[in-house]
Image (cartoon, coloured by chain):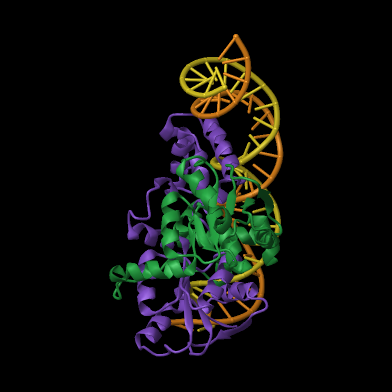
Chain colours: A green, B purple, C orange, D yellow
DNA sequence: ATTTCAATTGTACTCCGGTACAATAAAACC
DNA sequence: GGTTTTATTGTACCGGAGTACAATTGAAAT
């Protein structure tokens, strides 16, 4: 995954770069477009980002994350409308910073917690306290060992990788998988993964 | 920070415990209240949690995070209304899991990305003006034909089924798939589906 | 005119996944 | 005690998926 950092505050860029050990990181002199997550220091170069987005350029690949020292709800709304995928605090902890990068890389939207909270507050009227909780799901029917294997499968592991991790043979992996498919009512891995989130 | 894990699924509790290296972790036999983050396997002990929350006990200290193998928006709404502070996927990656714990510990609300997205959608047109946010980013890079094929793949169709539907040969299906995998940066079907679902 | 991209297809091959035969042993349940 | 479930494993086989070689054609952009 490629991450581009953009801003005038060198110490902040260095901070982010330190968080991104193991990632393909570049510090950019200007906004450009590519298949990458672009983290922008909104305090120093917010104008450039807004001009760039207003011009409607570069909608093909880059996912923008705008970070600000004191994030505001109004700014969040504005940036979301402009197409930014992530917005939050420049100085947030590493774990949140990485979660933000991964979330945006996966195509989702990442927002600072206070904004999420405000969204929940705004739609509170439609959050019902008597909502029906869904019926049992096939995962509840799995044996402990089957569940363990299922989690590795959802990590994208192959049968032989799972066998290594769990200290069993590939043959046993297949046996468990056969049981899982039967309980889930599917015919193979792809169907199972599709079912995993009710897709 | 104290984290309590509660559920009947031992492999899942072990998974979470592995993520929480460096934290003060306890695996609980029942729900109790203290100044701590309580992570609950909603699939196995959801009833207990709901009963506990309905009784209105323990509002002083514990912050509850409910995780489920297939999180749903309705359930998110229900649990939020009941006072749960975090809700998401039992099998999410470590970076998101830790971010969730930290966010809830800080007094904020953590929600799985699809729900955040739905909240953004509900607040309305003052935020959303950009329909391309709908799709995972790589989808925007696909040609029309590739997109069409992608949709059938997400329906769980095999290569030969897709070939029949689209009136092309299996060879062409494979060629398009190869292109899609390259644009998505994955090595095969399962990885693609996992990526499509943001897991 | 040239280049690039999209769409299509063939041959060939390897590997992985899934299933069908079978089996044993232990634990839990009736 | 008998039955069921869970966990484990072997042999064998087939088919699907994915990739590496290659190619042609048409449309759009330069």
The picture places residue B193, in percent across and down from the top left corner, at 52, 50
Is the residue A98 above or below the residue D26 in the image? below
> A122 or C23: which is nearer to us?
A122
Is the residue A40 above or below the residue B112 in the image? above
> B33 or A193: which is nearer to us?
B33
Is the residue A116 above or below the residue B168 in the image? below
x 70%, y 62%: residue: A18
- Please give left or right for residue B179 compared with residue A126 in the image: right
The picture places residue A35, in percent across and down from the top left corner, at 58, 44
Q: Is residue B7 visible?
A: no
> A138 or B51: which is nearer to us?
B51
> D15 or B92: which is nearer to us?
B92
x 51%, y 40%: residue: A60
Q: Is residue A15 visible?
A: yes
- Please give left or right for residue D18 compared with residue A143 in the image: right
The picture places residue A186, in percent across and down from the top left corner, at 46, 55
Rendering quarter of residue A185: bottom left
């Amino acid at each position: 995954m490629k991450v581009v950092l953009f801003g005038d505050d060198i110490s902040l860029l260095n901070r982010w770069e330190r968080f991104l050990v193991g990632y393909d990181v570049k510090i950019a002199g200007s906004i450009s477009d590519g298949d990458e997550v672009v983290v922008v220091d909104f305090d120093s170069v917010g104008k450039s980002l807004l001009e760039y987005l207003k011009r409607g350029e570069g909608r093909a690949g880059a996912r923008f994350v705008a970070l600000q020292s004191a994030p505001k709800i109004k700014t969040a709304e504005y940036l979301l409308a402009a197409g930014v995928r992530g917005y939050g605090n420049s100085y947030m902890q590493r774990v949140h910073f990485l979660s933000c990068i991964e979330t945006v890389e996966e195509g989702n939207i990442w927002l600072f917690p206070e904004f999420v909270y405000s969204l929940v507050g705004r739609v509170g009227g439609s959050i019902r306290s008597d909502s029906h909780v869904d019926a049992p799901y096939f995962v509840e029917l799995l044996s402990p060992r089957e569940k363990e294997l299922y989690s590795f499968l959802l990590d994208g592991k192959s049968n032989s990788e799972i066998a290594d991790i769990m200290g069993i043979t590939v043959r046993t992996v297949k046996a468990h998988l056969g049981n899982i498919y039967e309980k889930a009512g599917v015919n193979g891995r792809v169907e199972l993964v599709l079912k995993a989130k009710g897709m």
